[in-house]
Image: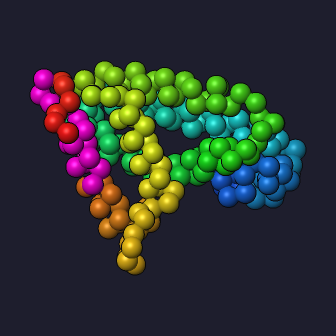
């Protein structure tokens, strides 16, 4: 994501630090030094930057979901999956912030899940529910989300050496093709009912 101007530079620096060190391991002074500004030029300090990053990520996710109906009309579930995968690949640092949060980072930032995650999840369920009569929307969303975030953050678990990370184009192509096959297996039949197991 672009870091235009001073405010963008501050948020870009904060994003990188929060993703690598967590909120608890990052100070306002560290953000300022990484952005090349004085600590007083970090709007709202460390917590202000944290909230701004989560809000921006929320807005970007909601904008993504607004694209889903047209993408689905054009290419079905495969294209929707590709849209999500490309988005997550472009937002790995934000995902890492949420992973840190799941490990009890930033516990003094109360209500972040309710403020920034719940509206996104609610909108995702609305959008997916409007696409097709999936056999089990809750599980479809869960499996797709788990798979995408797992691949983006950890790559492919492989027995033999080879391209396995989200940075490797062959690994991306392999993962994308497998997820397309998975979508074919769990998607609805023409009548909107689950196919045979």
Q: Residue furthest left?
A: 190
Tell me which corner region of the image, top left, top right, bottom left or bottom right, holds residue 196. top left
Find residue 138 and report its horizontal and vertical position in percent: 40, 29
Tell me which corner region of the image, top left, top right, bottom left or bottom right, holds residue 127. top left
Left or right relative to 22: residue 125: left
Up-down relation of residue 37 to residue 41 (above or below): below
The residue drawn where x is 77% and y is 35% is 109
* Numbered-mark total: 0
* Region rendered in magenta: 178-191
Find residue 7 and report its horizontal and vertical position in percent: 70, 43
Q: In this orientation, which residue lies closer to the viewer: 79 or 181? A: 181
Is residue 52 on the magenta stretch?
no
Q: In this orientation, which residue lies closer to the viewer: 67 or 157? A: 157
Find residue 113 and report its horizontal and vertical position in percent: 64, 30
Up-down relation of residue 190 to residue 144 (above or below): above
Left or right relative to 88: residue 195: left
Find residue 28 and report its horizontal and vertical position in percent: 84, 49
- Residue 49 visible in rendering: no
Left or right relative to 68: residue 123: right
């Amino acid at each position: 994501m672009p870091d235009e101007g001073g405010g963008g530079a501050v948020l870009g620096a904060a994003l990188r630090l929060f993703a690598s060190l967590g909120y608890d391991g990052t100070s306002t002074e560290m953000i300022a030094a990484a952005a090349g500004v004085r600590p007083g030029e970090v709007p709202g300090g460390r917590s202000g930057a944290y909230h701004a990053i989560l809000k921006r990520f929320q807005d970007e996710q909601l904008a993504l979901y607004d694209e889903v109906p047209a993408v689905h009309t054009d290419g079905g579930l495969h294209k929707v999956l590709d849209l999500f995968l490309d988005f997550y690949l472009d937002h790995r640092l934000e995902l890492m912030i949420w992973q840190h949060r799941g490990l009890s980072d930033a516990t003094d930032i109360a209500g972040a899940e309710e403020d920034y995650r719940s509206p996104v999840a609610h909108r995702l369920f609305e959008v997916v529910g409007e696409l097709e009569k999936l056999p089990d929307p809750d599980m479809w969303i869960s499996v797709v989300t788990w798979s995408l975030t797992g691949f983006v953050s950890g790559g492919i678990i492989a027995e033999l050496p080879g391209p396995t990370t989200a940075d490797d184009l062959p690994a991306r192509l392999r993962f994308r093709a497998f997820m397309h096959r998975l979508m074919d297996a769990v998607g609805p039949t023409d009548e909107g009912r689950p196919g045979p197991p």
